[in-house]
Amino acid sequence: MNRSKEEKSSGDVVRLVLMNLEHDGGPEEKPGMLPVRWRRAYEEVLLPLRPDWLGLTELTYSQTRPEATAREKAAAKRRWRAAQKTLGMRGFRAKMGQGRNPVGLLVRESAFTIGPQYHHPQVFRTPPANVVLGVPEVPEVPIVTAVIHSSFCSPTGREAEAYELTPLVDKVKAQHGAAPGLSRAACWLFGDANEEPVEIGEPRSGTDWHSPHVTDLVHRCHRAVKQPDGTWKSHTFLDELMHDCGMHDPARYAARRLGQLEAQSTTAGYARIGQGGECRIDRGYMDAWTVQAVEEVRVVDMTGISDHRVLVVDLSRRRLIEALRRGFAPLEPWELVV
């Protein structure tokens, strides 16, 4: 049976969504009045999608620092409550770091069991939101989920942050065919990588940092690394490290295994002049078993609402349960990068 993009039968599909709403839609127009872009994003885009897991990467006005004013804290509390109420989901916010755009995630309690939330105050410019989930059918296998927003301004900082994500990946542990009883987990990391993926297997080549259209030279220093011969090469460290660790990009899976070439559509860069053009910096990484539960990946247009598009990943719940039980062989590292 065919279904529309927005519809799904409750229970047979698990929907993961990633949204980077530019600066959380902006400040309140007046106390208690949410901005138009926020309302459009949540009511026109997210509500019809009905996500089961939602990653949010710019909660600028939905989270505050300890030293924030009482008015700022009240506004953040109102907005975060509105997000959860609008979507009927339970929310978790990461604590503030040096960056001004913290992250968070929302979970539909009918889709998952919810475990602990962990905080990572060190190293990260923007600490990830890290919540452990599960499904009732396989209660012994935790699903380690996190929303990330990699440092926008430092390639070397992003490298350190990427390595700090590997302890989450490390929890996947037990390999296919390992002795029964060994601990194992799933791992889903989604967010704004603030850098491009490796070029191999991508529908568009990486940014040409020597193009005369690249006029934002500071941005080039943020996104690329100068080579010994004086040329500039896009920084792709996170993508490389995740693939080295055996993680996989669901958009690549959808494109390579399911023939959904549009899954690798660009997600950002279309709203900034002089920065090199569109790119695919909003991405997900999934372990070598659960990525094989992917049924569809698509990118949702956000023109007039945000400078990033929304990423939607649909999983087969039946296949997800099979993956958590290690019912089939994992993908090999880098298998989808062809």
Image (cartoon, rainbow, N blue to C red):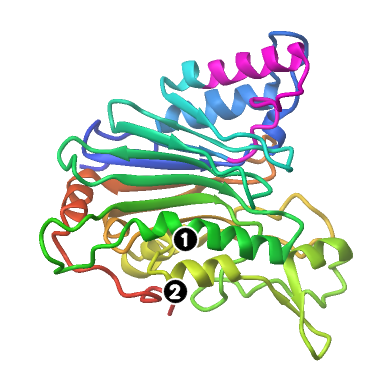
Determine which residue is flagged by label 2: 244
Residue 166's disc number: 1
Q: Nearer the viewer, residue 190 or 263?
A: 190
Residue 284 in magenta stretch = no
Residue 240's disc number: none
Residue 74 in magenta stretch = yes
The label nearer to you, 2 versus 1, is 1
On screen, 268 above or below 233?
A: above
> For the point 12% across and 65% down, which residue is it?
179
> For the point 48% across and 15% down, which residue is it?
85
Real-space CA distance between mark 2 and mark 1, rounded to the nearest whole angstrom: 11 Å
Q: Nearer the viewer, residue 230 or 204?
A: 230
Give the class, few, some or many, for how many residues have Cα within 10 Å of label 1's Cα (few <14, many ≥20): few
Q: Position of residue 70 (x, y in %)?
A: 74, 12
On screen, 334 above or below 59?
A: below
Answer left or right for 261 relative to 217: left
> For the point 33% across and 38% down, which residue is it?
133
Q: Residue furthest bottom?
A: 229
Q: Callout 1, which amino acid?
A: Thr
